[in-house]
Image (cartoon, rainbow, N blue to C red):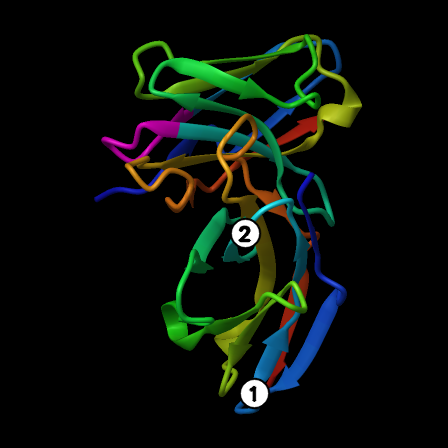
């Protein structure tokens, strides 16, 4: 059973450029989450999917951010017109939701570290 | 709204001594509580969780945590610390009641554990 994978692991970009990150969840996990972690802070929730449906978005997710999970498997997170404040670690997690809603464990990927110059 | 406090930014303990990493939480309803560990440049690894039942929860690598409802705490413990336990530890909470936002985890800021040989 492979874990959650994320690509790329590191990304350096110039302010104003667009970037896209990919997350591959644990196979058969139906929920997928995106979090952002800045230096010295815990992860902060951005958005989550149940299968292909995006069910919740945090207010942290500005109009420049968009996430998709088109076939209910992998997901992409795109940031348009990047700003220096977008520099952070972007973490993806997945879980298998069952009847005991909310009790499932989220398993995290290694993250994508973004640096905006 | 749900929140987590980890009152200590850093905990130092000698190898072989018991360790405690503190966590307190706030939720509207009943909590689901989680501990994760993060090694440098890595994602979060799940250690243990409290859903219901026995207040003492045992997890990976010899860690355990004690849920105390009256004190709204969920402290992480280990009887004998190893140098390899040195890492960043995060406590997280989710409100057990369903509804919008019920599946996201809210994390504390993390506690850096240093085990001294």
Figure check: A111 above or below B54: above
Query: Quarter holding the N terminus of chain A?
Result: top left
Camera-nearest label, 2 or 1: 2
Q: Residue B56 at what x, y percent from top left?
A: 45, 74
Q: Residue A31 at what x, y percent from top left?
A: 37, 29
- Any magenta on residue A108? no
Mark carried by residue B31: 2
Mark-to-mark CA distance, 2 and 1: 26 Å
Q: Residue B112 at what x, y percent from top left?
A: 67, 65
Q: Residue B7 at what x, y percent from top left?
A: 76, 64
Q: Callout 1: helix, strand or loop?
A: loop
Answer whether residue A117 is visible to the viewer in this image. Answer: no
Figure check: A13 above or below B23: above
Q: Earlier in the sequence, mark 2 or mark 1?
A: 1
Residue corresponding to mark 1: B18
Residue at (68% x, 68% y) in the render: B71
Tell me which segment is drawn in magenta: A23-31
Q: Is residue A97 left or right of residue A106?
A: left
The picture quadrant where one finds residue A99 is top left
Residue at (31% x, 28% y) in the render: A30
Residue at (64% x, 44% y) in the render: B28
Answer whether residue A86 is visible to the viewer in this image. Answer: yes
Figure check: A48 above or below B47: above
Query: Quarter holding the C terminus of chain A?
Result: top right
Q: Callout 2: helix, strand or loop?
A: strand
**Along the viewing direction, whichever of A67 and B42 lies nearer the viewer:** A67
Residue at (67% x, 9% y) in the render: A64
Q: Main secondary structure of the magenta part?
A: loop
Q: Tell me the chain of label 1.
A: B
């Amino acid at each position: 059973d492979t874990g959650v994978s994320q690509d790329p692991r590191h990304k350096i970009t110039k302010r104003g450029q667009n970037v896209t990150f990919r997350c591959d969840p644990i196979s058969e996990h139906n929920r997928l989450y995106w979090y952002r972690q800045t230096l010295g802070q815990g992860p902060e929730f951005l958005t989550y999917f149940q299968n292909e449906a995006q069910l919740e978005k945090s207010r942290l997710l500005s109009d420049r951010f968009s996430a998709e999970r088109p076939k209910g498997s992998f997901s992409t997170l795109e940031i348009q017109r990047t700003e220096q404040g977008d520099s952070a670690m972007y973490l993806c997690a997945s879980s298998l939701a069952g009847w005991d809603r909310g009790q499932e464990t989220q398993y995290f990927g290694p993250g994508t570290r973004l640096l905006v110059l | 709204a749900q929140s987590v406090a980890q009152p200590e930014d850093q905990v130092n303990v000698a190898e072989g001594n018991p360790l405690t990493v503190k966590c307190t939480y706030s939720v509207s309803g009943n909590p689901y509580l989680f501990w994760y560990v993060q090694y440098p440049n890595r994602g979060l690894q799940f250690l243990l969780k409290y859903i219901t039942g026995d207040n003492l929860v045992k997890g990976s690598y010899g860690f355990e945590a004690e849920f105390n409802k009256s004190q709204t705490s969920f402290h992480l413990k280990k009887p004998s610390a190893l140098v390899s336990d040195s890492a960043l530890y995060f406590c997280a909470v989710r409100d057990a009641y369903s509804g919008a936002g019920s599946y996201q985890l809210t994390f504390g800021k993390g506690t850096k554990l240093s085990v001294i040989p």
